[in-house]
Image (spheres, helix red, strand yellow):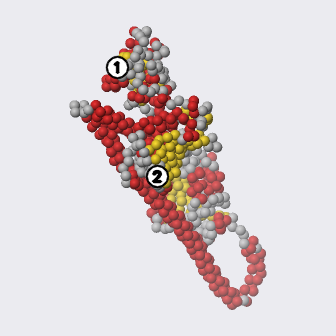
């Protein structure tokens, strides 16, 4: 089926013409497809006409303004449209005939003008003027441009009867017609003599004309067949491209489906695992808490129960921290700070804590010997750096039954430091190296052995490492252990390792804070009682306050009372900890103030560091860490 494209703008004239054309469309719908390009932008129109296929045509209705109503140079635009298109353009105006337009039913402007002139003369001559006289519609003619017809191989035989063809070159017969007529007159008498010969010639010419007509018809049919073959070839090529595109799309959809199904499976496994991981420590906490008040529980049992409760509480806090960190990372809300800190101190503290809580005597947790040779300073986020190392060491200890877990670093030539955690544990096959850093993925996927953990530690470590400008990878062999590496930029060396001092060594043993007074501000009664008990066991004098207003009023009325340190809660009814600390600092500027808060997000920690507080501690509060922080401000006798 051939296509006829109607191009028009959004003017009233265009809309009227289009409506008239649409009434004619059913008459030709079996052989011609009518396509309307209304109110199309110039760039879009130029691109569209360049894509039209041979065998179709364009009817240019009206295009004097663009899609926004701005006027256009119609003559220039028509010439621009005619240049790239592969189909003839029909127009009802003689203005552009011979300028790229093949023709059409052309309004005779000369006849219009002549009738207007006659009407004007009658108007001047009042005697002949007839009121309300209208101009008659002059007859329109079919005009066609011979050069455009040749461009699209359009035969004159296809044109309507009495069509006028312009730009047609003169034949030899036309140029010498008058000479031929003269010669014909001279030899006309000879025709009478050779009548029989002429009759034979006439028959021969008639036969030749028939043959020529048949040949032209065959040629026209061949042209149409070639166009049809080209159209079929183009359609086949397009179908092949579509099939290729559909094949690629199906492959991508299958991959996306498999990935979605894998994600759903991992999420389901994660939820089931999280239920197990959260309920397990909760079960221990609740169960052993109830046994503590059992009258048949001995003091030795109570100490063991307390250790179990503390261990499971730490495990529960780590699970909740991992979930919160992953949520913030995926939401793009986790921020990385930029500080200079000593790596040796963090490594020493980390190894000390893991040794302290390690119950497997067959596993040695140690620092590499290289860490004693230099004091390494790093410019990064110390909290997130320690979190990455903690996750890696925790996994190494978890999957190692016997042998060593070693933590260390090496300095590279490209001013990059590489940290590593090496173990002699179960190891992992190379084909799982990429999967192990996916969220929710656990080693029990391939070992069928259930290990504790939520399957988030390595995924979080990878994202944190990349956010801090580094990269993370591993080397492993099943049955021989694994080594996890990660890099960090921007390091420098300062002094020797002997200058470093472990935070965990700042305060050891039983403290005697007799004579020291600590003010504790906490609105939760149970938390207040807990802090008072911890401090009283260190022989400190403790004053408790339940709100910010209470502690501020106390210092306003007792400026000279010897308070050596303040533990300030942040979130309290009425006046919060920030405002209370600021007002107390104005009254007693020399008293150290340590914030204690349940806000554990990085933004909150940064705010605490930049505020009036001398230090801070995150809830749930660990007794040992609290005493260590207080030791920095109160001497141990």
Q: Is residue 552 above or below residue 595?
A: above
Residue 467 visible, this angle? no
Identify the residue shown where x is 24% and y is 31%.
293
User: Which one is nearer the viewer's eye here, 240 or 313?
Assistant: 313
For residue 2, side relative to residue 108 (left or right)? left
**Count of number-bearing discs:** 2
Q: Is residue 350 above or below residue 396?
A: above
* Rendered location of residue 55, percent (x, y): 56, 67
Q: Is residue 565 above or below residue 101?
A: above
Q: Which residue is mark 1?
A: 546
Q: Which residue is mark 2?
A: 427
How many neighbours does mark 1 have within 10 angstroms: few (below 14), some (14-19), or many (20 or more)? some
Residue 448 visible, this angle? yes
Circle number at residue 587: none
Identify the residue shown where x is 38% and y is 19%.
539
Which sits earlier in the primary sequence, circle 2 or circle 1? 2
Q: Is residue 210 above or below residue 102?
A: below
How many neighbours does mark 2 have within 10 angstroms: few (below 14), some (14-19), or many (20 or more)? many
* Rendered location of residue 307, percent (x, y): 34, 35
SS class of the residue under badge 1?
loop
Question: Is label 2 in contact with label 1 (beta carbons under 8 Å)?
Answer: no
Identify the residue shown where x is 62% and y is 51%.
74
Q: CA distance from mark 2 to mark 1?
A: 52 Å
Which mark's residue is nearer the viewer, 2 or 1? 2
User: Which one is nearer the viewer's eye here, 385 or 210?
Assistant: 385
Identify the residue shown where x is 59% and y is 75%.
222
């Amino acid at each position: 089926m051939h296509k006829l494209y109607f191009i028009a703008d959004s003017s009233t004239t265009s809309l009227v013409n289009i409506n008239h054309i649409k009434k004619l469309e059913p008459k030709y719908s079996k052989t011609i497809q009518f396509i309307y390009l209304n109110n199309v932008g110039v760039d879009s129109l130029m691109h569209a006409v360049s894509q039209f296929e041979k065998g179709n045509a364009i009817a240019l209705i009206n295009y004097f303004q663009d899609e926004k109503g701005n006027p256009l140079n119609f003559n220039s635009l028509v010439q621009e449209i005619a240049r790239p298109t592969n189909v003839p353009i029909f127009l009802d105006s003689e203005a552009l005939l011979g300028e790229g337009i093949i023709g059409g039913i052309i309004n005779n402007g000369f006849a219009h003008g002549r009738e207007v002139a006659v009407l004007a003369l009658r108007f001047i001559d009042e005697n002949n003027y007839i009121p309300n006289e209208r101009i008659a519609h002059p007859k329109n003619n079919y005009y066609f441009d011979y050069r455009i017809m040749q461009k699209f191989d359009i035969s004159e035989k296809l044109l309507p009867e009495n069509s006028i063809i312009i730009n047609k070159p003169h034949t030899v017969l036309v140029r010498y017609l008058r000479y031929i007529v003269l010669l014909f007159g001279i030899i006309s008498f000879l025709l009478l003599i050779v009548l029989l010969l002429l009759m034979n010639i006439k028959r021969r010419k008639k036969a030749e004309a028939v043959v020529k007509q048949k040949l032209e018809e065959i040629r026209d049919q061949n042209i149409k067949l070639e166009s049809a073959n080209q159209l079929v070839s183009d359609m086949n090529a397009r179908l092949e491209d579509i099939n290729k595109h559909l094949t690629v799309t199906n492959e991508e959809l299958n991959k996306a489906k498999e990935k979605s199904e894998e994600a759903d499976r991992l999420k389901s496994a994660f939820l089931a695992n999280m239920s197990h991981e959260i309920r397990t420590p909760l079960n221990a906490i609740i169960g052993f808490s109830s046994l503590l008040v059992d009258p048949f529980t001995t003091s030795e049992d109570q100490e063991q129960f307390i250790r179990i409760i503390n261990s499971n509480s730490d495990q529960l806090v780590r699970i909740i921290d991992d979930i919160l960190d992953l949520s913030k990372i995926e939401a793009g809300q986790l921020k990385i700070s930029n500080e200079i800190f000593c790596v040796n101190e963090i490594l020493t503290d980390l190894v000390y804590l893991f040794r302290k809580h390690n119950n497997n005597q067959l596993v040695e947790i140690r620092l590499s010997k290289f860490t004693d040779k230099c004091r390494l300073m790093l410019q990064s986020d110390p909290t997130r750096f320690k979190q990455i190392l903690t996750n890696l060491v925790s996994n190494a200890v978890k999957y190692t039954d016997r042998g060593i877990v070693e933590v260390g670093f090496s300095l590279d030539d490209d001013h990059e430091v590489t940290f590593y955690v090496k173990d002699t544990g179960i190891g992992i096959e190379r084909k799982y190296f990429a999967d192990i850093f996916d969220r929710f993925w656990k080693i029990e996927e391939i070992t069928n052995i259930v290990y504790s953990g939520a399957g988030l530690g390595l995924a979080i470590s990878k994202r944190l490492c990349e956010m801090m400008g580094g990269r993370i990878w591993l080397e492993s062999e099943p049955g021989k252990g694994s080594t996890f590496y990660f890099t960090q930029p921007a390091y420098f060396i300062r002094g020797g390792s002997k200058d470093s001092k472990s935070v965990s060594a700042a305060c050891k043993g039983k403290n005697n804070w007799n004579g020291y007074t600590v003010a504790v501000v906490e609105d939760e009664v149970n938390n207040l009682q807990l802090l008072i008990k911890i401090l009283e066991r260190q022989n400190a004098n403790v004053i408790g306050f339940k709100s910010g207003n209470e502690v501020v009023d106390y210092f306003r009325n007792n400026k000279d009372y010897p308070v050596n340190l303040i533990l300030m809660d942040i979130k309290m009814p009425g006046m919060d900890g920030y405002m209370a600390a600021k007002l107390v600092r104005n009254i007693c500027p020399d008293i150290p103030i340590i914030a204690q808060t349940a806000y554990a997000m990085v933004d909150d920690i940064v705010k605490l560091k930049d505020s009036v507080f001398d230090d801070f501690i995150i809830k749930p509060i660990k007794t040992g860490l609290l005493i260590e922080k207080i030791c920095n401000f109160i001497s141990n006798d």
